[in-house]
Image: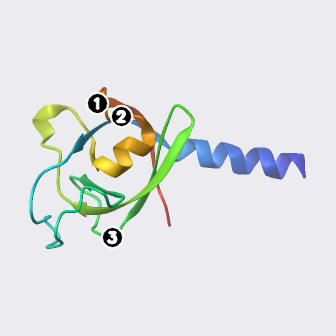
Amino acid sequence: MRAVLAALMLCACATAHAEIASWYDEGQLTASGERFNPEAITAAHRTLQFGTHVRVCRHGRCVVVRINDRGPAARTGRDIDLSRAAARSLGLINTGVGAVELKVLP
């Protein structure tokens, strides 16, 4: 039983990726055609399909966001842009940018 639990924990950790997140609070329409809502738990990513759910964790806090927009620009070095509400949940509002772990959910 312990071996199974250890294997599951290893698997879960192996699929998480350290990334750089920022947040945004502007725009009227997302790339998916939805109206942007800064209080929704959503995010922008350059390559993930719209509707993909991603668990984003930082300093022991986690939030599950739904990808509904494109961004951030590759030149920024950032991997995901979070809505204001998602960033608030992770404590990113004051810093604006921070390291997070991302895990794409099935």
Mark 3 is surrounded, within 10 Å at the Cα level, by few (under 14), some (14 to 19) or many (20 or more) other residues, namely few
Which tag, 2 or 1, sits closer to the chain's start?
2
**Do tag 1 and tag 3 residues touch (Cβ < 8 Å)?**
no
Q: Which of the labelled discs sits on residue 92, or is there none?
A: 2
Query: Distance of mark 3 from mark 2, alpha carbons?
Result: 23 Å
Mark 2, secondary structure of its residue = loop
Q: Secondary structure at mark 1?
A: strand
Q: Report how far apart the C-alphas of labels 1 and 3 lie in the structure.
A: 23 Å
Q: Bin the neighbour count of mark 1 within 10 Å (Cα to Cα): few under 14, some 14-19, many 20 and up.
A: some
Q: Are marks 3 and 2 in contact (CB under 8 Å)?
A: no
Residue 90 in the image: above or below residue 59 = below
Q: Residue at x 24, y 54 (%)?
A: 44
Q: Picture coordinates of residue 54 (x, y %)?
A: 42, 56
Dot 3: what SS?
loop
Q: Which residue is mark 3?
A: 51
42 vs 101: above or below:
below
Q: Quadrant of residue 41?
A: bottom left
Residue sitting nearer the eye, 6 or 56: 56
List x then y, in percent, for residue 33: 13, 73
Find disc 1 in the rendering and name its residue: 97
Q: Amino acid at mark 3?
A: Gly
Q: Are the residues flagged by discs 2 and 1 in contact, CB closer than 8 Å?
A: yes
Bin the neighbour count of mark 2 within 10 Å (Cα to Cα): few under 14, some 14-19, many 20 and up.
many
- Disc nearer the start of the sequence (3/2): 3
> Type of residue at label 2?
Leu
| Colour mode of the rendering | rainbow
x, y percentage for residue 24?
A: 20, 45
Q: Residue at x 74, y 47 (%)?
A: 7
Q: Amino acid at mark 1?
A: Val
